[in-house]
Amino acid sequence: MKQQTLAMAADQDSGFERQRKPTRREEFLQAMDAIVPWAALCQVIEPHYPKAGNGRPPIGLQRMLRIHFIQHWFNLADLACEEALYDSASLRRFVGIDLGLEPVPDATTMLRFRRLLNANKLGEALFARVGKELQERGIKVNTGTIVDATIIAAPSSTKNADKARDPHMHQTRKGQQWYFGMKLHIGVDSQSGLAHSAVVTAANVHDKHPLPDLLHGNEQRVYGDSAYASQKALIASKAPRAKDFTNQRTRRAGEVDEVQRSKNRNKSRIRARVEHVFGVVKRLWGFGKVRYRGLQKNATRAFTALALANIYLARGRLQGQVRP
C-alpha cells in the first residue's frame, strides 16, 4: 500500500474541510475517470512510447495521457497546464500526482508527448480505438450518416518572425464573410449522434470533396446541408445503397420553392445532431481556433478532441456499464 503523505491528505480533504461540496470540475473528472477506456488507449500509444533503459525512467504512460486529455478538456497550453496542476488539487487527484513525493511533469515533457502523438499520427488511432470501444459496449454505427464541416480559424496576421501567414491554411468565403484557417469535416451516425469519421483540410476545400471519406459504405441514408446538394453520384461511389437526404436549394430564379423548403426543414431535424459534436469540440473543448502551425498538428488535436467528444456525448450510456 502506498504511504500517504501530508500533501496527498490535503489534496483528498482528509477531514480538513467539512463544509464543502464537489465542484462541477470534480464531478466531470470523476465521470471521465470512470468511463474513459484508459487501458485500451494506452495500448495504442505504448509501442511508440519510450521504454525504461539506461537514462531517466519515463513518466507513466497513463499519467501523460491523462495530462494530455486535461489539456484538451480545459484548453490549456503546456505551461498553463503545468501551472494548473500545481494550483488545482482536483486535477492532481485525476492525474495521480502526490506533491509530497514528486513534482508535476514540466511543460517540455508535455510538449514531447504531444510531438510523439503527432509524429506517429496517434490522434487518428485514438479516435478509431474509441469508436471500436464504444461499439463493443453496444453503441453501434447504424445505417444513416450526417455529413458536415466547420471552419477552425487560424491567425491571419503576418506580424510574426516569418512575416507570413501559415502556408497550410487558406481563406474561404461563407456568405459575405471571409475566413482564414482549416476545415474539420465529420461523418456522424444519425441515431447515436457520435462521429465515426473525420477529415481535416484547408478552409478553401469545398465540403463535397471529402464526402466519400466520411461514409462507411453501409449507409441507407445520407444527410447534409445544401453544400452537399446534387452529389448523388459522389455518395453512390462509396455507399451504393444510400438515398440522398441532403438539403436541396430552395431558391431558383428569385422564387422560393416552399415544398422543397418544407422537406429541408424535416431533414434538418435529424441533420442538426451533427451540431452537437461541433458544439462540444469548439465550445466546450475550446477548439474554435487553431493552436499550432500546420495542418498535421491541428489534425492530431482535432481527432483527439473528436474521440473525447464521443465519450462525453455517450457518457449517459456508459456510466451504467463496468469499465473493462
Image (cartoon, rainbow, N blue to C red):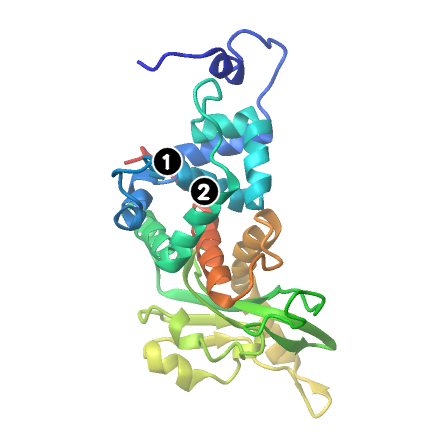
Name the spot of residue 314 as percent of width and height, x first: 43, 45
Picture residue at 49% right of the left edge, 31% below the top: 104
Left of 283 or right of it: where is 200? left
Please tell me whether residue 154 is drawn above or below residue 262 in the rendered image.
Answer: above
| Residue that protrudes farthest toward the front in the picture | 54
3D distance between C-alphas at marks 1 and 2 = 9 Å
Task: Identify the secondary structure beneath mark 1.
Answer: loop
Q: Earlier in the sequence, mark 1 or mark 2?
A: 1
271 and 96: which one is in front? Answer: 96
Q: Is residue 185 visible?
A: no
Q: Is residue 171 visible?
A: yes
Tell me the tag on residue 59.
1
Q: Residues within 10 Å of mark 2 (few under 14, many from 20)?
A: some
Left of 24 or right of it: where is 2? left
Name the spot of residue 115 as percent of width and height, x first: 43, 54
Please tell me whether residue 255 is drawn above or below residue 164 in the rendered image.
Answer: below
Residue designated by label 2: 109
Quadrant where the N terminus sits is: top left
Name the spot of residue 173 as percent of width and height, x first: 67, 78
How many discs mark residues in the rendered view? 2
Quadrant where the C terminus sits is: top left
134 and 257: which one is in front? Answer: 134
Picture residue at 48% right of the left edge, 55% below the top: 301
Picture residue at 63% right of the left edge, 11% below the top: 19
309 and 110: which one is in front? Answer: 110
Residue type for callout 1: Ile
Residue type for callout 2: Thr
Q: Are marks 1 and 2 in contact (CB under 8 Å)?
A: yes
